[in-house]
């Protein structure tokens, strides 16, 4: 019999009936009716081509065929239980692999992970840059942070405000600092940047040095604005913002739920 065709539900019912030697008590354990137990046993007997129980004046008895398979069957169920426990052990893990843009990790995420770890010294984090794309399976990720208009195909929740802010030093150059992904359109002058950098985080750093003004995600610049390293010169509305995302199996994990809660406070 092929493994994929094993009558697992029938075998589970057989195990209960064999332990109790009673369809009624087996039904109570399994929260079904005695008739349903009888149907499962008859279907299992038909599938296996053997008789598993006989009725006697003293009650239900196992046949030699039924008794002969019980030891290995119960060992198999114990192995199933061990396998399930092994698969669930990751729920108690406190190691999290997180994918995020490099600039967000430096400007926002690292500080919040440090604060979260103060609540539990056993927490461990592995940060993966999303510059080359996002693949939860290959990178074995628990959570990712994306700059987009929504969570896409994954489960997700928005974190921080959406849109962009224009920042620069109080006495710095007023020319634009460019970076891949910088917004354009009517609200942003279509000027050739005096300086091009690799990401929005570097654009903020260049702005603090007075090298120009950078139009960057609001959340990314919040720390530098609050610290007085740059001045806000305006905002640009946009549907884009940062999202915490993960496929449903990861999203349901206790450790991921805890991290999402810590990052969205």
Image: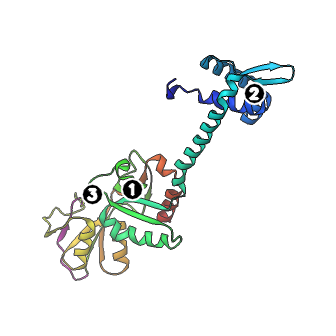
Dots 3 and 1: beta carbons under 8 Å? no
Assign a secondary structure to mark 3. loop
- 245 over 44 or under it: above or below: below
Q: Is label 2 or label 3 in front?
A: 2
Residue extending furthest toward the right:
57
The residue pinned by badge 1 equals 144
**Disc 2 versus disc 1: distance between alpha carbons?**
47 Å
Which residue is nearer to you in this view: 199 or 247? 247
Mark 3 or mark 1: whose residue is earlier in sequence: 3
The residue where tag 3 is placed is: 131
Q: Is residue 198 above or below residue 7?
A: below
Point out which mark residue 33 bears.
2
- Decide whether residue 223 is among the magenta residues: no
**Residue pictured at 33% horizontal, 76% vertical:** 224
Crowd band around label 3 with a 10 angstrom C-alpha radius: few (<14), some (14–19), many (20+)? few
Q: Which residues are magenta?
A: 170-181
């Amino acid at each position: 019999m092929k493994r994929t065709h094993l009558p697992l539900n029938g075998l589970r019912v057989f195990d209960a009936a064999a332990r109790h030697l009673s369809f009624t008590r087996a039904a109570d354990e399994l929260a079904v009716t005695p008739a349903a137990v009888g149907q499962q046993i008859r279907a299992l007997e038909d599938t296996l081509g053997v008789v598993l129980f006989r009725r006697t004046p003293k009650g239900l008895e196992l046949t030699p065929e039924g008794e002969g398979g019980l030891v290995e069957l119960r060992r198999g169920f114990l192995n199933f239980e061990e396998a399930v426990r092994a698969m669930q052990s990751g729920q108690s893990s406190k190691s999290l692999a997180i994918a995020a843009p490099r600039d967000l990790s430096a400007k926002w995420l690292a500080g919040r992970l440090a604060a979260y770890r103060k609540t539990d010294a056993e927490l461990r984090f592995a940060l993966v840059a999303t510059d080359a794309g996002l693949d939860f399976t290959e990178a074995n990720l628990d959570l990712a942070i994306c700059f987009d208009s929504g969570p896409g195909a994954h489960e997700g929740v928005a974190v921080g405000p959406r849109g962009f802010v224009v920042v620069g030093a109080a006495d710095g150059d007023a020319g634009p600092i460019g970076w891949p992904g910088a917004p354009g359109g009517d609200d942003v002058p279509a000027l050739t940047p005096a300086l091009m950098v690799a990401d929005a985080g570097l654009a903020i750093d260049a702005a603090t040095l007075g090298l120009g003004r950078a139009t960057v995600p609001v959340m990314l610049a919040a720390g530098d604005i609050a610290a007085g390293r740059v001045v806000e010169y305006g905002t640009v509305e946009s549907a884009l913002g940062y999202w915490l995302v993960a496929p449903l199996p990861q999203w349901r994990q206790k450790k991921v739920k805890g991290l999402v809660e810590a990052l969205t406070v």
